[in-house]
Amino acid sequence: MMSICGNHALRELSSPGKSGSVFFLSQDDRFMIKTLRKSEFYICSLSHRIPLNHYHVRTYENMLITKFFGLHRIMPSSGQKFRFVVIGNMFCTELRIHRRYDLKGSSLGHSADKVEIDENTILNDLDLNYQYYLEPSW
């Protein structure tokens, strides 16, 4: 909790996604906060999604999908509602990450634009043409 609520300010990521959402990182890089549109908030808040994710996280600690830690809506005195989700930053690891993917579950316009792919390239759904071999414990 101190990662997000401590004395250090959150860091805003410089390039927001196509959705217009703004991303923030905790000072220690362990958590990300993503702002949500009303429709995204509604989808995330469906009664079964968060409990299912929580159960899956507890059952499979080494899972490779996003871990949700909180879904929030606040309305400061200014009157404008802010909706956001707190998620674990999967890139905060001591392990070397060879490929990074931002999977949306759609093939429509979801491939990387770069010709040269390096470790910092964010790949998309259509770029997932690679066979992965995981240990049985995964």
Image (cartoon, helix red, strand yellow):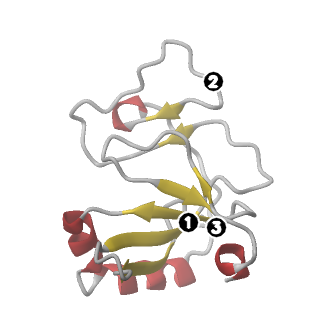
Instruction: Give the mark, 3 or 2, whose residue is nearer the N terminus.
Output: 2
Q: Which residue is mark 1?
A: 63
Alpha-carbon distance for marks 2 and 1?
24 Å
Give coordinates of residue 110: x percent, y percent: 31, 33
Q: Which residue is mark 3?
A: 137
Give coordinates of residue 49: x percent, y percent: 31, 79
31, above or below 55, in the image: above
Looking at the rendered structure, the kind of residue marked 1 is Met
Q: Residue 20 versus residue 54: which sits nearer the camera?
A: 20
Label 2 environment density (alpha carbons within 10 Å; few <14, some 14–19, many ≥20) = few
Q: Nearer the viewer, mark 3 or mark 2?
A: 2
9, above or below 106, in the image: below
Query: Do labels 1 and 3 touch, CB within 8 Å?
Result: no
Q: Residue at x 63, y 24 (%)?
A: 118
In this image, 136 relative to 21: left or right?
Answer: right
Q: Nearer the viewer, mark 2 or mark 1?
A: 2
Q: Residue at x 54, y 59 (%)?
A: 64
Looking at the rendered structure, the kind of residue marked 3 is Ser
Give coordinates of residue 111: x percent, y percent: 36, 28
Instruction: Give the mark, 2 or 1, whose residue is nearer the N terminus.
Output: 1
In this image, 96 relative to 109: left or right?
Answer: right
Query: Do labels 2 and 1 touch, CB within 8 Å?
Result: no
Per the image, label 2 sits on a secondary structure element best described as: loop
Q: Which residue is mark 2?
A: 118
19, above or below 32, in the image: above
Looking at the rendered structure, the kind of residue marked 2 is Asp
Q: Residue 65 versus residue 40: which sits nearer the camera?
A: 40
Instruction: Give the mark, 1 or 3, whose residue is nearer the N terminus.
Output: 1
